[in-house]
């Protein structure tokens, strides 16, 4: 079934924030993507996202938000969450289920901590509560590539760090094509968002999250580490934890039951 998808932009502070929406459910579902948003926003991706995530469209009105268009140096994940709350208010979204993937999960943590009334249920996937040695090493290397304009190398390293070996064996032959499309005009947006990942540290405040929470990780995650999901779940009382065996940071793409698992969690009845 096809669900009409649309692109929109909402004023946040002194900037605009791109978003797309689709679905006709009577409940709102917000998706916050990862660091790839630093290279390209969701603008122009409405149809693609509505097809990829159509599983949610029958029961939910789905919103996928980018970070705002103009980012200031030192912009933090907590400030991103504040801007997300402002965007929700501008669109009349008073409460929503929230899925945060990778850096989007970092933002979602602060959204649930600082604005608990806005979050009904929370899904934190392949993300971390605070930077660690693995994350700092990987993201710092990406920042160096971006600073040197090495887009192809950045894309290849991202793929190598994200996907399982079995997946990569099928798709490495496409590496020569990487970097030929999608190259941003500037890497400044990516560099600011990447720096915020390294600086992120919500660990001490995770116990303030009281909404039903599902934490998903991969036991081969080469970007945030294999134990990052467990660390988060241990800090959020009553949270559910699921770890994908033999998958890494791209579990949200590789695991065939990833979205069915989330949908099942969202449809659970909580007292």
Image (spheres, rainbow, N blue to C red):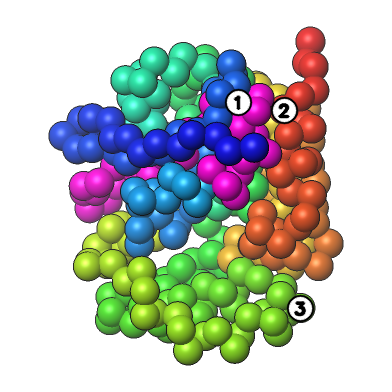
Near mark 2 (Cα within 10 A), the count class, few <14, some 14-19 or many ≥20, is many
Residue where numbered disc 1 is placed: 60
Residue where numbered disc 2 is placed: 266
Q: Residue furthest right?
A: 245
Is there CB contact under 8 Å for labels 1 and 2? yes
In the rendering, which numbered label is found on residue 157? none
Task: Judge whether residue 66 is colored magenta.
Answer: yes
Q: Is residue 154 toward the left or the right of residue 125 in the image?
A: left
User: Residue 60, position in %: x, y?
Assistant: 60, 26
Near mark 3 (Cα within 10 A), the count class, few <14, some 14-19 or many ≥20, is few
Of callouts 3 and 1, the N-terminal one? 1
Q: In which quarter of the image is residue 29?
A: top right
Of callouts 1 and 2, the N-terminal one? 1
Task: Judge whether residue 83 is colored magenta.
Answer: no
User: Residue 264, position in %: x, y?
Assistant: 79, 32
User: Residue 174, position in %: x, y?
Assistant: 55, 84
Q: Name the element at disc 3.
A: helix
| Residue 79 appears in the rendering | no
| Residue at x 61% of width, y 32% of height | 57
Residue where numbered disc 3 is placed: 166
Q: What stretch is highlighted in magenta?
A: 50-77
Q: Name the element at disc 2.
A: helix
Q: Residue furthest front?
A: 1
Is there CB contact under 8 Å for labels 3 and 2? no
Q: Name the element at disc 1.
A: strand
């Amino acid at each position: 079934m096809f669900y009409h998808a649309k692109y929109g932009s909402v004023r946040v502070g002194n900037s605009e924030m791109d978003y797309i929406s689709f679905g006709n459910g009577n409940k709102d579902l917000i998706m916050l993507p990862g660091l790839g948003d630093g290279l390209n926003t969701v603008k122009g991706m409405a149809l693609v996202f509505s097809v990829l995530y159509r599983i949610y469209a029958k029961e939910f009105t789905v919103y996928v938000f980018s970070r705002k268009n103009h980012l200031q140096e030192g912009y933090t994940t907590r400030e991103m969450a504040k801007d997300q709350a402002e965007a929700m208010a501008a669109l009349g979204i008073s409460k929503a289920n929230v899925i945060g993937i990778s850096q989007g999960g970092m933002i979602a943590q602060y959204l649930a901590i600082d604005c608990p009334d806005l979050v009904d249920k929370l899904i934190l996937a392949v993300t971390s509560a605070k930077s660690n040695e693995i994350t700092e090493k990987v993201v710092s290397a990406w920042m160096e590539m971006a600073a040197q304009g090495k887009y192809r190398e950045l894309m290849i390293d991202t793929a190598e760090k994200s996907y399982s070996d079995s997946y990569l064996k099928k798709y490495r032959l496409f590496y020569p094509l990487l970097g030929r499309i999608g190259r941003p005009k500037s890497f400044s947006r990516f560099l600011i968002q990447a720096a915020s990942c390294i600086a992120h540290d919500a660990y001490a405040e995770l116990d303030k999250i009281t909404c039903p929470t599902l934490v998903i990780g991969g036991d081969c995650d080469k970007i945030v580490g294999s134990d990052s999901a467990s660390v988060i779940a241990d800090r959020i009382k009553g949270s559910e934890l699921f770890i994908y065996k033999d998958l890494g940071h791209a579990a949200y793409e590789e695991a065939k039951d990833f979205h069915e698992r989330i949908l099942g969690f969202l449809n659970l009845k909580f007292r």
